[in-house]
Image (cartoon, rainbow, N blue to C red):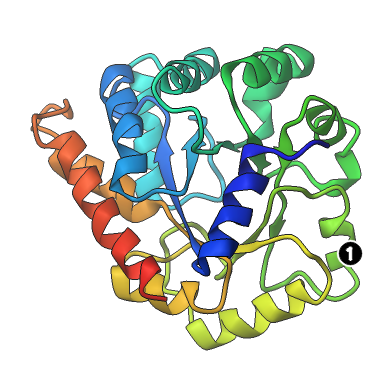
């Protein structure tokens, strides 16, 4: 693969000597236009890489906050095609910030793998995280994605042992996403010391950046986790900020976009202190 936006961003951050701040937002939450405005504001608020969730009706790895975000998006008509369109419209305003689509394989399979990859590449998607597609199925999506210049980012977890880790790392590109806790997103706070040990173990096996996610909610947590990693992901806290800004009918208010931007700015400050 040629150097992707993700590769370039992590190389630039390495030169700066700081970790990446990776934000997760649900595509289409609470509606398409508000979601697009949230995305447009993330880079200036401090996001170095943006993950966009692809809404799915059965998100088995996600906690309540992200599940509800997906339900809101689906209720308001969000589809995989519209999530790709979000990226396309975002790219009209921002050429450099890497975009990673994150979610589950079922919607992609229904959409059609080849069609999905072609549309994602043309829209400006840089990476994929498909949480329920194992390395044994690399021919299905991973290798075709890489052939189109899209990084395929794999998850490593606290239960990924020495025997399994090389398989997880094979064909992984962009970065490795280390899941800092066992369980669903947003369910517990990670232990910074344990995370540091696990990150070091992974880094002994790969030259890729290792980014840590699941359970990070505050600037202080972000700083402690980022100190031992190449980046930190915050998702549940951000989608909760969206939820808490909505009106009684679940519609966006004039505070929704700024609620996310303000939180992201605070979290970015924490990461930059690492």
Residue 135 seen from this side = yes
Of 99 and 84, nearer the camera is 99
Residue 137 pos. (x, y %): 87, 39
- The residue at 42%/64% (across/down) is 187
| Image-quadrant location for residue 103 | top right
Residue 180 pos. (x, y %): 56, 70
Query: As displayed, is residue 68 above or below residue 56?
Result: below
- The residue at 49%/38% (across/down) is 97
Residue 212 seen from this side = no
Of 150 and 188, nearer the camera is 150
The residue at the far front in this view is: 15
Query: As displayed, is residue 252 above or below residue 153?
Result: above
- The residue at 72%/11% (across/down) is 115
Q: How many marks?
A: 1
Element type at marker 1? helix
Residue 104 pos. (x, y %): 63, 36
Residue 131 pos. (x, y %): 66, 45
Mark 1 neighbour class, 10 Å CA radius: few under 14, some 14 to 19, many 20 or more: some
The residue at the far bottom in this view is: 193
- On the rendered structure, is 220 left or right of 177? left
What residue did someone put label 1 on? 166
Of 194 and 211, nearer the camera is 211
- On the rendered structure, is 189 left or right of 169? left
Q: Quadrant of the C terminus?
A: bottom left
Q: Quadrant of the N terminus?
A: top right
- The residue at 43%/28% (across/down) is 94
């Amino acid at each position: 693969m040629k150097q992707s936006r993700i590769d370039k961003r992590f190389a630039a951050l390495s030169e700066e000597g700081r970790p990446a701040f990776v934000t997760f937002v649900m595509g289409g939450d609470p509606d398409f236009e508000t979601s697009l405005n949230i995305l447009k504001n993330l880079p200036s608020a401090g996001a170095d890489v943006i993950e966009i969730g692809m809404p799915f009706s059965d998100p088995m790895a996600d906690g309540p906050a992200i599940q509800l975000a997906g339900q809101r998006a689906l209720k308001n008509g969000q589809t995989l095609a519209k999530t790709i369109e979000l990226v396309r419209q975002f790219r009209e305003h921002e050429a450099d910030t890497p975009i990673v689509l994150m979610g589950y394989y079922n919607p992609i399979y229904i959409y059609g793998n080849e069609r999905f990859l072609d549309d994602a590449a043309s829209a400006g998607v840089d990476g994929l995280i498909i949480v329920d597609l194992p390395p044994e199925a690399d021919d299905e999506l991973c290798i075709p994605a890489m052939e189109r210049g899209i990084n395929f980012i794999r998850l490593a977890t606290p239960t990924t042992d020495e025997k399994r880790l090389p398989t997880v790392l094979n064909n992984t590109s962009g970065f490795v996403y280390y899941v800092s806790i066992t369980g669903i997103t947003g369910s517990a706070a990670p232990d910074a010391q344990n995370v540091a040990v696990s990150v070091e173990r992974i880094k002994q096996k790969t030259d890729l950046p290792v980014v840590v996610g699941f359970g990070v909610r505050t600037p202080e947590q972000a700083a402690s986790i980022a100190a031992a990693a190449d980046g930190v992901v915050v998702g549940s806290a951000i989608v909760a900020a969206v939820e808490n800004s909505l009106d009684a009918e679940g519609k966006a208010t004039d505070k929704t976009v700024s609620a996310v931007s303000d939180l992201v700015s605070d979290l970015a400050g924490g990461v930059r202190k690492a």
